[in-house]
Each structure stands twice: as C-alpha cells, then as structure tokens.
Amino acid sequence: PTPALALPVGTTLDRYIMNRQYQFAYATGELSQLLRDIALAGKIIHREVNRAGLIDLTGGMGIENVQGEKQQKLDVIADIRFRRALTNGGEVCAIISEEEEGIILTGNNGGKYVVAIDPLDGSSNIDVNVSIGTIFSIYRRVTPTGTQPTLEDFMQGGHEQVAAGYILYGSSTILVYTTGHSVNGFTYDVSLGEFILSHPDIKSPADGQIYSCNEGNIDLFAEPVQAYLHNCRRQQLTARYIGSLVADFHRNLLKGGIYLYPPTKSNPDGKLRLLYECYPLAFIAERAGCLAVNETESILNIQPHSLHQRTPLYLGAPQMVKQLTVFVRQGM
Ligand code: AHM
Ligand code: MG
C-alpha cells in the first residue's frame, strides 16, 4: 500500500472509502462497496429509529428471537433492512444475525465476504428514546468463491476480521469503523444525507474515570469482580451505564472508561455474544488502544465454536482493564 494520506474532518464517508481503496493496488473495491451498503442500511435504520414513535413502530412483536428474548418491531425491521442491503450489494455470500438461528445464505456465492451483524443492540431502550446501535463484523470467506458458504466461514476467530464497526443512533447518529488500521468516526448529517468524517483516527485514553456495569447484579458477581467494583467506588470513579453496549462503549472509547459484563452462577458465560458483539468491539477497541478480555484471555483469542456463543466481557482503557485483571486473577 502507498502511505495513507490523512483526510480532513468534513470528508464524506464515500470519498474516504474510495480514497482508502486507491491506496491498495490490488483492491477490487468489493469491501468498499460492502461498507457503503452497510452505511446505506444505517441511514435507513436512522430514519426508522427517528420516526419510530410516530408511526407506531415501537413495542414488542409478541414473538421471541432465538435467544428467547422478546423482539421489538425495530429489531425485526433493522434485521430485514441489513439483510436486504447486504444481499442486494452482491459482495456478501452469507450473513449471521443475532436475530436469526442459522446462517443466512444470500445466494451470491461469488461474493468474497461474510458478515456477522447485531442489527439493533440495546433493544430494551427502543421504546424509551434511549440510544441503540448496530454492530457489524466482516470476514473474507475461507470456503472457495463460487461454492455455498458454510459455518467454517464464520468460525475463523476474532483476529481474522477484515473490518468491524458500529452505528450509534444517539443524540446524533455516528458510524465508527476500522479495517484494521485506524479507527474513524463519521457523524450523519441529516440535511445532506451523508456520513461526514468527524472523529479521525480515534485513540482512546490509556486510563479513565468511568466504570459501566449493571451494578444491580453485584451480588451475583464473583467476589473478585465485586472487589474491583468496590475499589472503583473507593476511588470515586463515575458510574455510567446506559444498557446499550454500543453507547456505553462509544462513550468510554472517547472519554476513557471500562465496561463490564461479568459472569454469574446462572450465566457463567455472561450475556453478550462473541460473534455479534464482543469480537467486533474488541477489534475496534484494540485498534484504538483499548483492551478487551474475559476471565482468562483476550477476547480476540477466544476460539469460536458456535454462532450464538457468549462470553463475559471487560472492555476499555488498558490501565483499567489491567487492574481488573489483577483482581480477577488473584481470585482464581
Ligand atoms: P440485546 O442484544 O438483547 O440488546 O442485549 C445486549 C445488551 C447490551 O447492549 C447491554 O450492554 C446489555 O445487554 C445490558 O444488559 P443488562 O440489562 O443485563 O444490564
Ligand atoms: Mg445485542
């Protein structure tokens, strides 16, 4: 690749993606197109989220998804929108979604990529106008192009992601992604209908003052995690927990903090899904200078074995994650 030119704040996402593509002599533009497809779906979800209260989209569908959770209407809508955008684009041969049991074949067996997506995370916040997000993770398929993709394409492990990102539908909508180099954030300008580079080359602080955890569950956590949380209180850190992983992660990424979703006796693997939530955020986090671990290893090192696998997650500023690790390892 030719040396990366720093593009100025205000550059549109389209121009940014094109510029990056030209730096790689052999790039065919397929990943670029795929990223644009995701951005388009993100704009559509932005629209749906913003008018949800107006057109009676909020509220449950009365059905449960594969995890046995109530699906919100917007979850379903987001799932459909992303599937459609990724299928129509042609670059993706298979998709897995937090909302679907198995692999979704797009029929584009010539496509080089597979995508894992959590179309709308933090769905308990939809009805109450609180931030929600989309998380995505892209892999180059390992099965031969032209054949039907298989589970193997999704079981490559976190280090094999070629790109990962999220879209936060917050007080403004922002798309943050990385293709493994820098992490860049693009704020959606509604009047232009464009994502605009607003947060170039995000580098997270090495230490932070915020801890984000569902402290209502503290009695269910193992003693070392409890001890760590007590220590956070002793240091008078700031507690912030939205209950939308994307929003909690984004805030901590910019300001410095740690997000915790520990295991409990009844949920020894915690709640969050490895492929849809933890791998992509860990990939972004590491590129921005953060750490992402569970009790024993780095999230990206976890061996995947099933589509809806879960893992405990400790994510954020390296100093804070290291300190947490000291507590946890001492208690083992
Ligand atoms: P979801 O995929 O059903 O939306 O669940 C994931 C969400 C995360 O966004 C959030 O951090 C966590 O669940 C909150 O869980 P809890 O309510 O147990 O604290
Ligand atoms: Mg989720």
Image: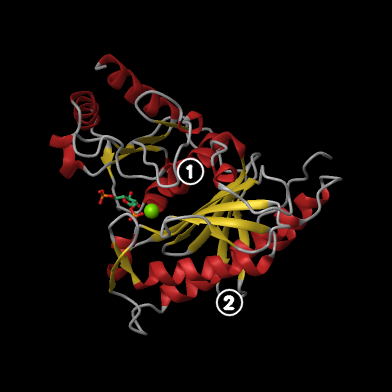
Question: If the image is split into quadrants, where does the C terminus sit?
Answer: top left
Q: Of 219 and 157, which appears nearest the observer? A: 157
- 103 or 229: nearer the viewer: 103
**Of 210 and 158, the residue lying toward us:** 158
- The residue under label 2 is 191
Occupied quadrant, residue 5:
top right
Q: Position of residue 31 (x, y in %)?
A: 71, 53
Residue 66 in which image quadrant: bottom left
Say which element carries label 2. Answer: loop
How many angstroms separate mark 1 from mark 2 (CA)? 29 Å
The disc placed on residue 12 is none
N-term mark: 1 or 2: 2
Q: Can you identify the residue that label 1 sits on?
A: 281
Task: Please give the name of the residue rendered at 28% of the width and 20% of the height, measured from the top-left corner.
Answer: 327
The residue at the far left in this view is 219
The mark lying in front, picked from 1 and 2, is 1
Residue 76 visible in this rendered orientation of the protein: yes
In this view, 160 is above or below 327: below
Identify the residue shown where x is 47% and y is 66%.
79
Name the kind of residue labelled 1 in the image. Answer: Leu
The amino acid sitting under disc 2 is: Ser
Residue at the extreme front of the image, as rendered: 147
Q: Secondary structure at mark 1?
A: helix
Q: What is the tally of numbered marks visible in this picture?
A: 2
Task: Tell me the quadrant of the picture where the N terminus can be found.
Answer: top right
- Name the residue at the top extreme: 330
Query: Is residue 12 among the parts visible in the rendering?
Result: no
Give how far across and how far down residue 316 sits, in percent.
42, 36
